[in-house]
Amino acid sequence: MKLEYPEIKKRAAKLKFRTKAFIDGDFAAAQSEETFTTENPATGKPLADIAACDTPDVDRAVRAARKAFDSGVWSRLKPGERKRVLLKWADLLETHALELALLDTLEAGKPIGDCATMDIPDTIHCIRWHAEATDKLYDHVSPTGPENLALIVREPVGVVGCVIPWNFPAQMAAWKLGPALATGNSVVLKPAELTSLSAIRMAELAAEAGLPAGVFNVVPGLGETAGQAIGRHMDVDMVAFTGSTEVGRYFLKYAAESNLKRIILECGGKSPQVVFEDALDLENVANNAVGAAFWNMGENCSCGSRLIVHTKIKDELVERVAKLAKTWKVGDPLDPRNRLGAMIEKPHLEKVLGYIAAGKAEGAKLVMGGRRILEKTGGCFVEVTMFDEVSSRMKIARDEIFGPVLSVIPFSTEDEALALANDTNYGLAASLYTQDVNRAHRAARAIRAGTVSVNCFSEGDITTPFGGFRQSGFFGRDKSIWAHQQYTELKTVWIQLA
Ligand code: NAP
Ligand code: MG
Protein backbone atom coordinates (compact mmCIF):
# COMPACT_ATOMS: atom_id res chain seq x y z
CA MET A 1 0.00 0.00 0.00
CA LYS A 2 1.57 3.26 -1.13
CA LEU A 3 0.37 6.24 0.85
CA GLU A 4 0.81 9.93 0.12
CA TYR A 5 1.88 12.56 2.64
CA PRO A 6 -1.61 13.96 3.51
CA GLU A 7 -3.02 10.48 4.16
CA ILE A 8 0.01 9.52 6.26
CA LYS A 9 -0.39 12.67 8.36
CA LYS A 10 -4.07 11.86 8.87
CA ARG A 11 -3.25 8.31 10.02
CA ALA A 12 -0.53 9.58 12.34
CA ALA A 13 -2.94 12.05 13.95
CA LYS A 14 -5.39 9.24 14.69
CA LEU A 15 -2.89 6.92 16.41
CA LYS A 16 -3.61 5.75 19.93
CA PHE A 17 -0.60 5.29 22.18
CA ARG A 18 -0.14 2.53 24.74
CA THR A 19 1.80 4.25 27.49
CA LYS A 20 1.96 1.73 30.33
CA ALA A 21 4.36 -1.05 31.08
CA PHE A 22 3.34 -4.55 29.96
CA ILE A 23 3.91 -7.01 32.80
CA ASP A 24 2.60 -10.54 33.28
CA GLY A 25 0.25 -10.30 30.31
CA ASP A 26 -1.29 -6.95 31.18
CA PHE A 27 -0.74 -3.21 31.12
CA ALA A 28 0.51 -1.69 34.35
CA ALA A 29 1.37 1.78 35.62
CA ALA A 30 4.72 2.16 37.36
CA GLN A 31 4.35 1.34 41.06
CA SER A 32 5.44 4.91 41.86
CA GLU A 33 2.83 6.14 39.33
CA GLU A 34 5.62 8.31 37.89
CA THR A 35 5.73 8.98 34.16
CA PHE A 36 8.13 10.58 31.73
CA THR A 37 7.28 12.46 28.56
CA THR A 38 8.18 11.23 25.10
CA GLU A 39 8.46 13.85 22.36
CA ASN A 40 8.28 14.01 18.60
CA PRO A 41 11.77 15.20 17.57
CA ALA A 42 10.40 16.53 14.27
CA THR A 43 8.18 19.05 16.08
CA GLY A 44 9.62 19.28 19.58
CA LYS A 45 6.10 18.64 20.89
CA PRO A 46 5.18 16.04 23.51
CA LEU A 47 3.56 12.84 22.26
CA ALA A 48 2.69 10.94 25.43
CA ASP A 49 3.51 10.31 29.08
CA ILE A 50 4.99 6.88 29.60
CA ALA A 51 5.15 4.77 32.78
CA ALA A 52 8.55 5.38 34.37
CA CYS A 53 9.46 1.94 35.63
CA ASP A 54 12.09 1.53 38.32
CA THR A 55 13.45 -1.27 40.50
CA PRO A 56 10.07 -2.43 41.95
CA ASP A 57 8.58 -2.69 38.44
CA VAL A 58 11.61 -4.54 37.10
CA ASP A 59 11.33 -6.87 40.12
CA ARG A 60 7.69 -7.53 39.28
CA ALA A 61 8.48 -8.18 35.64
CA VAL A 62 11.38 -10.50 36.49
CA ARG A 63 9.16 -12.44 38.94
CA ALA A 64 6.51 -12.85 36.23
CA ALA A 65 9.15 -13.91 33.72
CA ARG A 66 10.66 -16.42 36.17
CA LYS A 67 7.27 -17.86 37.05
CA ALA A 68 6.41 -18.33 33.39
CA PHE A 69 9.81 -19.85 32.71
CA ASP A 70 9.69 -22.32 35.60
CA SER A 71 6.13 -23.35 34.79
CA GLY A 72 7.29 -24.59 31.39
CA VAL A 73 4.29 -22.98 29.72
CA TRP A 74 6.67 -21.59 27.08
CA SER A 75 10.13 -22.91 27.92
CA ARG A 76 9.05 -26.56 27.67
CA LEU A 77 6.39 -26.13 25.02
CA LYS A 78 6.96 -28.28 21.92
CA PRO A 79 9.14 -26.28 19.52
CA GLY A 80 6.47 -26.58 16.82
CA GLU A 81 3.94 -24.99 19.17
CA ARG A 82 6.28 -22.12 19.97
CA LYS A 83 6.70 -21.66 16.25
CA ARG A 84 2.93 -21.49 15.74
CA VAL A 85 2.49 -18.72 18.32
CA LEU A 86 5.43 -16.69 17.04
CA LEU A 87 4.21 -16.94 13.46
CA LYS A 88 0.79 -15.74 14.57
CA TRP A 89 2.50 -12.84 16.32
CA ALA A 90 4.38 -12.02 13.10
CA ASP A 91 1.06 -12.05 11.22
CA LEU A 92 -0.42 -9.60 13.72
CA LEU A 93 2.64 -7.37 13.44
CA GLU A 94 2.07 -7.41 9.69
CA THR A 95 -1.59 -6.49 10.08
CA HIS A 96 -0.49 -3.50 12.16
CA ALA A 97 2.66 -2.73 10.16
CA LEU A 98 1.71 0.83 9.22
CA GLU A 99 0.78 1.64 12.82
CA LEU A 100 4.15 0.34 14.05
CA ALA A 101 5.97 2.25 11.31
CA LEU A 102 4.18 5.45 12.30
CA LEU A 103 4.99 4.94 15.99
CA ASP A 104 8.71 4.71 15.19
CA THR A 105 8.52 7.68 12.81
CA LEU A 106 6.73 9.88 15.34
CA GLU A 107 8.89 8.98 18.29
CA ALA A 108 12.32 8.68 16.63
CA GLY A 109 12.01 11.17 13.75
CA LYS A 110 12.83 8.38 11.27
CA PRO A 111 11.57 8.73 7.68
CA ILE A 112 8.27 6.91 7.18
CA GLY A 113 9.62 5.51 3.90
CA ASP A 114 12.36 3.67 5.83
CA CYS A 115 10.09 2.55 8.67
CA ALA A 116 7.35 1.26 6.36
CA THR A 117 9.56 -0.45 3.78
CA MET A 118 12.60 -1.56 5.82
CA ASP A 119 12.37 -1.43 9.62
CA ILE A 120 8.95 -2.99 10.13
CA PRO A 121 9.15 -5.57 7.29
CA ASP A 122 12.58 -6.58 8.67
CA THR A 123 11.12 -6.77 12.18
CA ILE A 124 8.40 -9.14 10.99
CA HIS A 125 10.80 -11.18 8.87
CA CYS A 126 13.16 -11.54 11.84
CA ILE A 127 10.41 -12.92 14.10
CA ARG A 128 9.30 -15.32 11.33
CA TRP A 129 12.83 -16.49 10.57
CA HIS A 130 13.60 -17.40 14.18
CA ALA A 131 10.14 -18.91 14.62
CA GLU A 132 10.77 -21.16 11.61
CA ALA A 133 14.14 -22.25 13.00
CA THR A 134 12.49 -23.42 16.24
CA ASP A 135 11.55 -26.93 15.09
CA LYS A 136 14.40 -27.45 12.63
CA LEU A 137 17.43 -27.55 14.88
CA TYR A 138 18.81 -30.80 16.26
CA ASP A 139 20.92 -31.40 19.33
CA HIS A 140 23.97 -33.70 19.35
CA VAL A 141 25.07 -37.15 20.46
CA SER A 142 28.77 -37.19 21.18
CA PRO A 143 31.14 -39.91 19.84
CA THR A 144 31.82 -41.68 23.15
CA GLY A 145 32.58 -45.39 23.53
CA PRO A 146 29.86 -48.08 23.72
CA GLU A 147 29.60 -47.85 27.54
CA ASN A 148 28.20 -44.36 27.48
CA LEU A 149 25.65 -42.19 25.81
CA ALA A 150 26.42 -38.47 25.90
CA LEU A 151 23.79 -36.00 24.79
CA ILE A 152 24.78 -32.41 24.14
CA VAL A 153 21.60 -30.42 24.38
CA ARG A 154 20.70 -26.78 24.23
CA GLU A 155 18.36 -25.30 26.81
CA PRO A 156 16.94 -21.80 27.11
CA VAL A 157 19.04 -19.58 29.39
CA GLY A 158 16.05 -18.50 31.51
CA VAL A 159 15.08 -14.89 32.14
CA VAL A 160 16.65 -12.62 29.53
CA GLY A 161 16.85 -8.86 30.01
CA CYS A 162 16.97 -6.87 26.79
CA VAL A 163 18.08 -3.23 26.84
CA ILE A 164 17.92 -1.50 23.49
CA PRO A 165 18.55 1.85 21.76
CA TRP A 166 16.29 4.34 19.97
CA ASN A 167 17.66 4.30 16.43
CA PHE A 168 15.69 1.28 15.14
CA PRO A 169 13.17 0.84 17.96
CA ALA A 170 11.01 -2.04 16.67
CA GLN A 171 13.80 -3.74 14.75
CA MET A 172 16.31 -3.76 17.61
CA ALA A 173 13.59 -5.29 19.80
CA ALA A 174 12.94 -7.98 17.19
CA TRP A 175 16.64 -8.84 16.82
CA LYS A 176 16.60 -9.80 20.51
CA LEU A 177 13.05 -11.10 20.89
CA GLY A 178 13.04 -13.36 17.82
CA PRO A 179 15.86 -15.65 18.95
CA ALA A 180 15.28 -15.24 22.73
CA LEU A 181 11.63 -16.25 22.53
CA ALA A 182 12.07 -18.90 19.85
CA THR A 183 14.55 -20.73 22.08
CA GLY A 184 12.10 -20.72 25.01
CA ASN A 185 13.31 -17.91 27.24
CA SER A 186 11.21 -15.36 29.09
CA VAL A 187 12.07 -11.73 28.36
CA VAL A 188 12.06 -8.42 30.21
CA LEU A 189 12.66 -5.65 27.67
CA LYS A 190 13.59 -2.06 28.44
CA PRO A 191 13.22 0.13 25.36
CA ALA A 192 15.18 3.36 25.07
CA GLU A 193 13.54 6.12 27.05
CA LEU A 194 13.11 8.13 23.83
CA THR A 195 11.27 5.34 21.98
CA SER A 196 8.96 3.11 24.04
CA LEU A 197 5.77 3.06 21.98
CA SER A 198 6.38 0.35 19.36
CA ALA A 199 7.81 -2.09 21.92
CA ILE A 200 4.75 -1.78 24.17
CA ARG A 201 2.44 -2.34 21.20
CA MET A 202 4.51 -5.35 20.09
CA ALA A 203 4.05 -6.90 23.54
CA GLU A 204 0.30 -6.36 23.41
CA LEU A 205 0.15 -8.05 20.00
CA ALA A 206 2.29 -10.96 21.26
CA ALA A 207 -0.24 -11.57 24.03
CA GLU A 208 -3.03 -11.44 21.45
CA ALA A 209 -1.15 -14.07 19.42
CA GLY A 210 -1.19 -16.40 22.42
CA LEU A 211 2.20 -15.81 24.03
CA PRO A 212 1.60 -16.82 27.66
CA ALA A 213 1.53 -14.14 30.36
CA GLY A 214 4.95 -13.28 31.79
CA VAL A 215 6.93 -14.53 28.78
CA PHE A 216 7.43 -11.09 27.26
CA ASN A 217 7.35 -8.05 29.53
CA VAL A 218 8.13 -4.43 28.67
CA VAL A 219 9.37 -2.03 31.35
CA PRO A 220 9.77 1.44 29.85
CA GLY A 221 11.97 3.74 31.89
CA LEU A 222 15.31 5.42 32.17
CA GLY A 223 18.64 3.71 31.73
CA GLU A 224 20.01 4.59 35.14
CA THR A 225 16.93 3.25 36.91
CA ALA A 226 15.11 0.52 34.96
CA GLY A 227 18.17 -0.37 32.84
CA GLN A 228 20.46 -0.63 35.83
CA ALA A 229 17.86 -2.64 37.79
CA ILE A 230 17.86 -5.23 34.98
CA GLY A 231 21.66 -5.24 34.82
CA ARG A 232 22.04 -5.79 38.56
CA HIS A 233 19.10 -8.17 39.06
CA MET A 234 20.07 -11.40 40.81
CA ASP A 235 17.41 -13.40 38.97
CA VAL A 236 18.11 -12.22 35.42
CA ASP A 237 20.22 -14.91 33.71
CA MET A 238 21.37 -12.93 30.72
CA VAL A 239 21.31 -9.41 29.32
CA ALA A 240 21.29 -8.74 25.60
CA PHE A 241 22.25 -5.10 25.13
CA THR A 242 22.41 -2.85 22.09
CA GLY A 243 23.60 0.71 22.55
CA SER A 244 26.72 2.74 23.09
CA THR A 245 30.07 1.23 24.06
CA GLU A 246 30.04 3.46 27.14
CA VAL A 247 26.80 2.02 28.51
CA GLY A 248 27.77 -1.48 27.34
CA ARG A 249 30.69 -1.34 29.79
CA TYR A 250 28.26 -0.69 32.66
CA PHE A 251 26.53 -3.98 31.98
CA LEU A 252 29.79 -5.89 32.35
CA LYS A 253 30.26 -4.13 35.68
CA TYR A 254 26.66 -4.82 36.78
CA ALA A 255 27.13 -8.50 35.97
CA ALA A 256 30.46 -8.67 37.79
CA GLU A 257 28.93 -7.02 40.86
CA SER A 258 25.76 -9.15 40.88
CA ASN A 259 25.22 -12.71 39.67
CA LEU A 260 27.67 -13.04 36.75
CA LYS A 261 24.76 -13.05 34.35
CA ARG A 262 25.72 -13.64 30.76
CA ILE A 263 26.20 -10.36 28.91
CA ILE A 264 26.19 -9.84 25.18
CA LEU A 265 26.85 -6.38 23.79
CA GLU A 266 26.17 -4.80 20.41
CA CYS A 267 27.79 -1.38 20.51
CA GLY A 268 28.89 1.53 18.40
CA GLY A 269 31.02 1.84 15.30
CA LYS A 270 33.11 4.09 13.08
CA SER A 271 32.88 2.06 9.94
CA PRO A 272 35.24 2.57 6.99
CA GLN A 273 34.27 2.51 3.33
CA VAL A 274 37.48 1.83 1.41
CA VAL A 275 37.47 2.73 -2.29
CA PHE A 276 40.47 1.45 -4.25
CA GLU A 277 41.56 3.12 -7.47
CA ASP A 278 40.23 0.20 -9.57
CA ALA A 279 36.68 0.40 -8.18
CA LEU A 280 34.14 -0.37 -10.87
CA ASP A 281 31.54 2.28 -11.62
CA LEU A 282 32.10 5.28 -9.34
CA GLU A 283 28.44 6.24 -9.64
CA ASN A 284 27.51 2.95 -7.96
CA VAL A 285 30.16 3.55 -5.30
CA ALA A 286 28.78 7.05 -4.68
CA ASN A 287 25.25 5.69 -4.38
CA ASN A 288 26.32 3.14 -1.80
CA ALA A 289 28.50 5.64 0.04
CA VAL A 290 25.61 8.09 0.39
CA GLY A 291 23.34 5.35 1.70
CA ALA A 292 26.00 4.11 4.13
CA ALA A 293 26.65 7.57 5.52
CA PHE A 294 23.24 9.23 5.56
CA TRP A 295 20.64 6.46 5.87
CA ASN A 296 18.71 6.95 9.14
CA MET A 297 20.36 10.39 9.50
CA GLY A 298 23.63 8.58 10.20
CA GLU A 299 22.06 7.39 13.48
CA ASN A 300 23.13 3.94 12.54
CA CYS A 301 25.65 1.72 14.30
CA SER A 302 27.06 0.53 10.96
CA CYS A 303 27.09 4.05 9.49
CA GLY A 304 29.93 4.22 6.92
CA SER A 305 31.18 7.49 8.36
CA ARG A 306 34.76 7.26 7.03
CA LEU A 307 35.16 7.28 3.24
CA ILE A 308 38.77 6.19 2.66
CA VAL A 309 39.54 6.90 -1.00
CA HIS A 310 42.54 6.53 -3.31
CA THR A 311 43.91 9.96 -4.20
CA LYS A 312 43.58 9.22 -7.96
CA ILE A 313 39.78 9.03 -7.82
CA LYS A 314 39.03 11.04 -4.69
CA ASP A 315 37.99 14.35 -6.30
CA GLU A 316 35.69 12.64 -8.79
CA LEU A 317 34.08 10.50 -6.09
CA VAL A 318 33.61 13.44 -3.71
CA GLU A 319 31.89 15.35 -6.49
CA ARG A 320 29.56 12.44 -7.26
CA VAL A 321 28.77 11.85 -3.58
CA ALA A 322 27.97 15.55 -3.08
CA LYS A 323 25.70 15.60 -6.12
CA LEU A 324 23.78 12.52 -4.99
CA ALA A 325 23.66 13.58 -1.34
CA LYS A 326 21.92 16.80 -2.38
CA THR A 327 19.02 14.68 -3.65
CA TRP A 328 18.56 13.18 -0.15
CA LYS A 329 16.02 15.68 1.14
CA VAL A 330 15.77 16.47 4.84
CA GLY A 331 12.41 17.30 6.40
CA ASP A 332 9.20 16.08 8.02
CA PRO A 333 9.71 12.32 8.50
CA LEU A 334 6.01 11.76 7.76
CA ASP A 335 6.57 13.00 4.19
CA PRO A 336 7.63 9.92 2.20
CA ARG A 337 9.65 12.14 -0.19
CA ASN A 338 12.15 12.93 2.57
CA ARG A 339 15.09 10.57 2.91
CA LEU A 340 16.24 12.12 6.22
CA GLY A 341 14.03 13.02 9.15
CA ALA A 342 14.94 14.62 12.48
CA MET A 343 17.80 13.87 14.83
CA ILE A 344 16.53 12.02 17.89
CA GLU A 345 16.58 14.93 20.37
CA LYS A 346 17.98 18.41 20.95
CA PRO A 347 21.03 17.36 23.04
CA HIS A 348 21.98 14.87 20.34
CA LEU A 349 21.53 17.50 17.60
CA GLU A 350 23.85 19.77 19.59
CA LYS A 351 26.39 16.99 19.95
CA VAL A 352 26.39 16.46 16.18
CA LEU A 353 26.76 20.23 15.55
CA GLY A 354 29.63 20.19 18.06
CA TYR A 355 31.43 17.56 15.97
CA ILE A 356 30.89 19.62 12.84
CA ALA A 357 32.45 22.62 14.61
CA ALA A 358 35.36 20.43 15.73
CA GLY A 359 35.89 19.25 12.13
CA LYS A 360 36.16 22.86 10.96
CA ALA A 361 38.42 23.83 13.87
CA GLU A 362 40.78 20.91 13.20
CA GLY A 363 41.21 21.97 9.59
CA ALA A 364 39.02 19.55 7.64
CA LYS A 365 37.50 21.02 4.47
CA LEU A 366 33.71 21.38 4.65
CA VAL A 367 32.36 20.29 1.25
CA MET A 368 28.65 20.52 2.00
CA GLY A 369 26.12 21.06 4.76
CA GLY A 370 27.08 21.68 8.36
CA ARG A 371 24.09 23.67 9.64
CA ARG A 372 20.95 23.16 11.62
CA ILE A 373 17.91 23.72 9.38
CA LEU A 374 14.09 23.97 9.55
CA GLU A 375 14.36 25.47 13.02
CA LYS A 376 10.88 27.01 12.76
CA THR A 377 9.33 23.53 12.80
CA GLY A 378 10.64 23.09 16.36
CA GLY A 379 12.35 19.93 15.07
CA CYS A 380 15.95 18.75 15.28
CA PHE A 381 17.03 18.84 11.64
CA VAL A 382 20.58 19.01 10.35
CA GLU A 383 21.96 19.21 6.82
CA VAL A 384 23.66 16.31 5.10
CA THR A 385 27.31 17.12 5.78
CA MET A 386 30.60 16.09 4.19
CA PHE A 387 34.21 16.94 5.10
CA ASP A 388 37.15 16.33 2.76
CA GLU A 389 40.86 16.18 3.64
CA VAL A 390 40.19 14.58 6.99
CA SER A 391 43.09 12.98 8.83
CA SER A 392 42.77 9.91 10.99
CA ARG A 393 43.76 11.91 14.08
CA MET A 394 40.81 14.31 13.92
CA LYS A 395 37.87 13.87 16.27
CA ILE A 396 35.44 13.54 13.35
CA ALA A 397 37.47 10.55 12.11
CA ARG A 398 37.72 8.87 15.52
CA ASP A 399 34.43 9.33 17.40
CA GLU A 400 31.07 7.84 16.57
CA ILE A 401 29.15 11.00 15.64
CA PHE A 402 25.80 9.27 15.04
CA GLY A 403 24.72 11.97 12.63
CA PRO A 404 24.78 12.65 8.87
CA VAL A 405 28.45 13.62 8.79
CA LEU A 406 30.80 11.92 6.32
CA SER A 407 34.60 12.26 6.54
CA VAL A 408 36.71 11.71 3.43
CA ILE A 409 40.24 10.42 4.11
CA PRO A 410 42.68 10.03 1.19
CA PHE A 411 45.26 7.24 0.74
CA SER A 412 47.91 6.19 -1.81
CA THR A 413 48.72 2.50 -1.19
CA GLU A 414 46.75 -0.60 -0.24
CA ASP A 415 48.71 -1.00 3.00
CA GLU A 416 47.94 2.57 3.94
CA ALA A 417 44.23 2.07 3.18
CA LEU A 418 44.01 -1.02 5.37
CA ALA A 419 45.91 0.64 8.20
CA LEU A 420 43.50 3.60 8.04
CA ALA A 421 40.48 1.28 7.97
CA ASN A 422 41.73 -0.45 11.13
CA ASP A 423 42.82 2.75 12.87
CA THR A 424 39.79 2.81 15.18
CA ASN A 425 38.70 1.34 18.50
CA TYR A 426 35.59 -0.03 16.81
CA GLY A 427 35.05 -2.92 14.40
CA LEU A 428 31.41 -3.30 13.49
CA ALA A 429 31.20 -3.05 9.72
CA ALA A 430 33.23 -2.07 6.67
CA SER A 431 32.76 -1.79 2.91
CA LEU A 432 35.38 -2.04 0.21
CA TYR A 433 35.32 -1.42 -3.51
CA THR A 434 37.70 -3.03 -6.01
CA GLN A 435 37.56 -5.08 -9.22
CA ASP A 436 40.53 -7.19 -8.18
CA VAL A 437 39.27 -10.42 -6.63
CA ASN A 438 42.57 -11.09 -4.87
CA ARG A 439 42.64 -7.65 -3.34
CA ALA A 440 38.98 -8.01 -2.32
CA HIS A 441 39.73 -11.20 -0.35
CA ARG A 442 42.97 -9.84 1.05
CA ALA A 443 41.31 -6.66 2.28
CA ALA A 444 38.17 -8.42 3.56
CA ARG A 445 40.41 -10.59 5.75
CA ALA A 446 42.63 -7.76 6.88
CA ILE A 447 39.83 -5.45 8.04
CA ARG A 448 38.92 -6.07 11.67
CA ALA A 449 35.12 -5.87 11.51
CA GLY A 450 32.14 -8.15 12.06
CA THR A 451 30.69 -7.56 8.59
CA VAL A 452 32.73 -6.63 5.51
CA SER A 453 30.71 -5.91 2.39
CA VAL A 454 32.41 -5.92 -1.00
CA ASN A 455 31.34 -3.61 -3.84
CA CYS A 456 28.29 -2.52 -1.88
CA PHE A 457 27.22 -1.29 1.55
CA SER A 458 25.36 -4.03 3.37
CA GLU A 459 24.65 -5.44 6.81
CA GLY A 460 23.90 -8.81 5.17
CA ASP A 461 20.45 -10.28 5.73
CA ILE A 462 18.67 -12.26 8.44
CA THR A 463 20.75 -15.36 7.59
CA THR A 464 24.06 -13.66 8.42
CA PRO A 465 25.35 -12.79 11.89
CA PHE A 466 25.75 -9.11 12.75
CA GLY A 467 27.99 -7.88 15.53
CA GLY A 468 31.26 -6.23 16.26
CA PHE A 469 34.94 -6.84 16.83
CA ARG A 470 36.88 -4.82 19.41
CA GLN A 471 34.84 -2.15 21.24
CA SER A 472 31.88 -2.59 18.90
CA GLY A 473 30.74 -5.63 20.80
CA PHE A 474 31.19 -8.30 23.39
CA PHE A 475 30.33 -11.81 22.17
CA GLY A 476 27.03 -10.58 20.79
CA ARG A 477 25.75 -11.48 17.38
CA ASP A 478 22.28 -10.49 16.20
CA LYS A 479 20.47 -12.30 13.36
CA SER A 480 21.17 -15.78 11.98
CA ILE A 481 21.46 -19.14 13.69
CA TRP A 482 24.38 -17.86 15.78
CA ALA A 483 22.07 -15.32 17.41
CA HIS A 484 19.57 -18.09 17.96
CA GLN A 485 22.09 -20.25 19.77
CA GLN A 486 23.46 -17.52 22.00
CA TYR A 487 20.18 -17.51 23.94
CA THR A 488 20.77 -21.11 24.96
CA GLU A 489 22.94 -22.90 27.51
CA LEU A 490 24.88 -25.95 26.39
CA LYS A 491 24.28 -28.99 28.60
CA THR A 492 25.95 -32.39 28.62
CA VAL A 493 23.90 -35.38 29.77
CA TRP A 494 26.33 -38.25 30.35
CA ILE A 495 24.70 -41.66 30.70
CA GLN A 496 26.41 -44.83 31.92
CA LEU A 497 24.96 -47.73 29.95
CA ALA A 498 24.59 -51.08 31.69
P1 NAP B 1 22.77 4.22 24.96
O1 NAP B 1 22.70 5.59 25.48
O2 NAP B 1 23.94 3.38 25.24
O3 NAP B 1 21.45 3.49 25.48
C1 NAP B 1 21.13 2.17 25.16
C2 NAP B 1 20.19 1.64 26.21
O4 NAP B 1 20.86 1.56 27.48
C3 NAP B 1 18.97 2.52 26.43
O5 NAP B 1 17.85 1.72 26.68
C4 NAP B 1 19.39 3.32 27.65
O6 NAP B 1 18.33 3.89 28.38
C5 NAP B 1 20.13 2.28 28.45
N1 NAP B 1 21.02 2.88 29.44
C6 NAP B 1 21.57 4.13 29.43
N2 NAP B 1 22.30 4.33 30.55
C7 NAP B 1 22.22 3.19 31.27
C8 NAP B 1 22.75 2.79 32.52
N3 NAP B 1 23.51 3.60 33.25
N4 NAP B 1 22.47 1.54 32.97
C9 NAP B 1 21.68 0.72 32.24
N5 NAP B 1 21.14 1.04 31.07
C10 NAP B 1 21.40 2.26 30.57
O7 NAP B 1 22.60 4.18 23.38
P2 NAP B 1 21.57 5.00 22.53
O8 NAP B 1 21.98 6.43 22.61
O9 NAP B 1 20.18 4.65 22.90
O10 NAP B 1 21.82 4.37 21.05
C11 NAP B 1 22.89 4.70 20.25
C12 NAP B 1 24.03 3.70 20.34
O11 NAP B 1 23.57 2.39 20.03
C13 NAP B 1 25.14 3.97 19.35
O12 NAP B 1 26.39 3.88 19.98
C14 NAP B 1 24.98 2.87 18.32
O13 NAP B 1 26.14 2.57 17.61
C15 NAP B 1 24.48 1.75 19.14
N6 NAP B 1 23.83 0.72 18.30
C16 NAP B 1 24.47 -0.46 18.04
C17 NAP B 1 23.89 -1.44 17.24
C18 NAP B 1 24.58 -2.75 16.94
O14 NAP B 1 23.93 -3.65 16.45
N7 NAP B 1 25.87 -2.89 17.21
C19 NAP B 1 22.63 -1.20 16.70
C20 NAP B 1 22.00 0.00 16.97
C21 NAP B 1 22.61 0.96 17.78
P3 NAP B 1 17.94 5.44 28.11
O15 NAP B 1 17.28 5.46 26.81
O16 NAP B 1 17.03 5.80 29.20
O17 NAP B 1 19.20 6.24 28.13
MG1 MG C 1 20.57 7.36 25.70
Image (cartoon, rainbow, N blue to C red):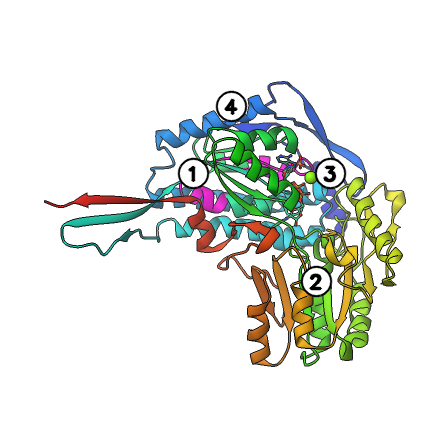
Disc assigned to residue 60: 4
Sequence order check, earlier mark of 4 and 2: 4
Image: 421 above or below 262: below
Does the numbered disc 1 mark a residue whose Cβ is under 8 Å from ligand 1? no
Neighbours of disc 3 within 10 Å: few (<14), some (14-19), many (20+): few
Neighbours of disc 1 within 10 Å: few (<14), some (14-19), many (20+): many
Q: Mark 1 points at which residue?
A: 185
Question: Disc 1 versus disc 3: distance between alpha carbons?
Answer: 37 Å
- Disc 2 on helix, strand or loop? helix
Question: Disc 4 versus disc 2: distance between alpha carbons?
Answer: 43 Å
Give the magenta range.
177-202
- Total of numbered circles in the picture? 4
- Disc 1 on helix, strand or loop? loop
What amino acid does circle 3 point to? Ala
Sequence order check, earlier mark of 1 and 2: 1
Image: 113 above or below 86: below
- Disc 4 on helix, strand or loop? helix
Left or right of 209, for residue 310: right
Neighbours of disc 2 within 10 Å: few (<14), some (14-19), many (20+): many
Tag 1–tag 2 contact (CB < 8 Å): no
Q: In the rendered image, which quarter contains the N terminus?
A: bottom right
* Residue 222 visible to the viewer: no
Q: Mark 2 points at which residue?
A: 291
What amino acid does circle 4 point to? Arg
Q: Provide residue 373's location: percent of width, then percent of height.
A: 87, 50
Left or right of 7, for residue 208: left
Q: In the rendered image, which quarter contains the C terminus?
A: top left
Sequence order check, earlier mark of 1 and 4: 4
Q: Mark 3 points at which residue?
A: 13
Q: Is residue 463 magenta?
A: no
